[in-house]
Image (cartoon, rainbow, N blue to C red):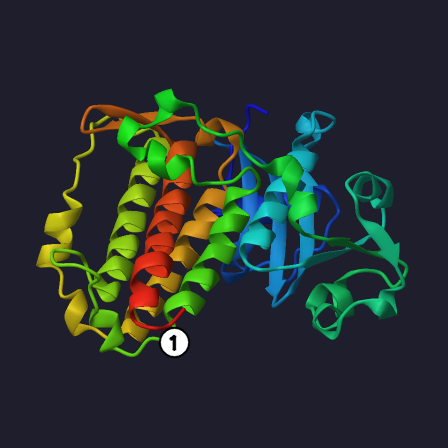
Amino acid sequence: MDIPITFARPADLAAVKQLLRESGLPRRDVVAPLLVHFLVARRGASLVGVVGLEALGRCGLLRSLAVAPAERGRGLGIELTRSLERRAWSLGIAQLYLLTTTAEGFFSRLGYRAIPRDRAPAAIQGTTEYRELCASTSVCMVRDLGEEVMASDTIGRPSPGEYAPYYAQYVDLVPDGDVVDLLRRQVDDTARLVGSLNDRDAEFRYADGKWSVKEVIGHIVDTERIMVYRALCFARGEPADLPAFDENEYVRRSKFTSRRLADLIAELRAVRASTLPFFAALDAEELERKGTAKNRPYSVRALEYIVAGHERHHVTVLAERYLPALGKR
């Protein structure tokens, strides 16, 4: 597809409601705050597609899928649906539900199955769309999201020319599969690994000149912020060469050792919660865009792999060198 799919903005509200009206879909409850989980497709300045998500814990409601008449029959509805599924999966949603009166065949082809309306979870039945806006004759459908579902949407591995040679040690640590899902699971694994340490343990260094556990976690956070900023710049077409950073100097100037380990873990979770929807919303063309940092080329997808591999590298060091010395493994 040559039509970019991006997050909706509050300013898109009128255009979204107009497209829903033209498609005969409910729009009375579509207000600006609801757009936080909506995706839109644009051709030039025109909004030509939309799909929405109501996130309800482990389940979600897929709603408001509409494509402008001139764009129908070209696969845009499929692309919007798959993009929303990736968005839902990145938010920890395991099942997507929807209600339809006219598109059962379309969604069946995409892996959704019809179920009795009263089999929908209480959270879905409590939505305005379920209770008030959709006809009682509408079909309720569901799709289970999971690694086997999202595998068809995974990005290809970056080639060596898409990142500086130094970062090969991290890219090589990332297994094949859905990198966004790996990032989602990985942060929990890291938190469990070090979560049993007290703050005194977290100041341990396995050798002179090495970072403490707290500094390792802080460094993971710093690096993720920097790599995602680079990815943001390159995905948006930034032509400027971005600066390098000296990780040792960043750690030296930080005050990680004076902070609680629990707070550093919470910060890692907060940063990852921002990273996941950013990468999940990028399409193939955006993931392949490139830019430079310290005159070295990087693709957006390579930076995603670097974030995942960098954390895996440091967690392995924590597990193999720090925790055994502390008697924790």
Q: Quadrant of the N terminus?
A: top right
Residue sitting at x 59%, y 46%: 86
Farthest top residue in view: 161
Taking depth in this image into account, of 212 and 288 the one nearest to the observer is: 212
Q: Is residue 236 visible?
A: no
Taking depth in this image into account, of 89 and 312 the one nearest to the observer is: 312
From the image, tell me which residue sits under label 1.
Answer: 196
Q: Position of residue 112 (x, y in %)?
A: 80, 48
Please state if 83 lies on the left or on the right of 139 as rendered: left
Residue sitting at x 50%, y 55%: 184
Secondary structure of the residue carrying tag 1 is loop
Q: Is residue 44 above or below residue 258?
A: above
Q: Given the image, on which type of amino acid does mark 1 rest?
A: Ser
- Label 1: how many Cα within 10 Å (few below 14, some 14–19, many 20+): few
Q: Which quarter of the figure has residue 39? A: top right
Q: Is residue 42 above or below residue 104?
A: above
Q: Position of residue 287 (x, y in %)?
A: 45, 31
Q: Position of residue 301 (x, y in %)?
A: 43, 33
Taking depth in this image into account, of 234 and 12 the one nearest to the observer is: 234
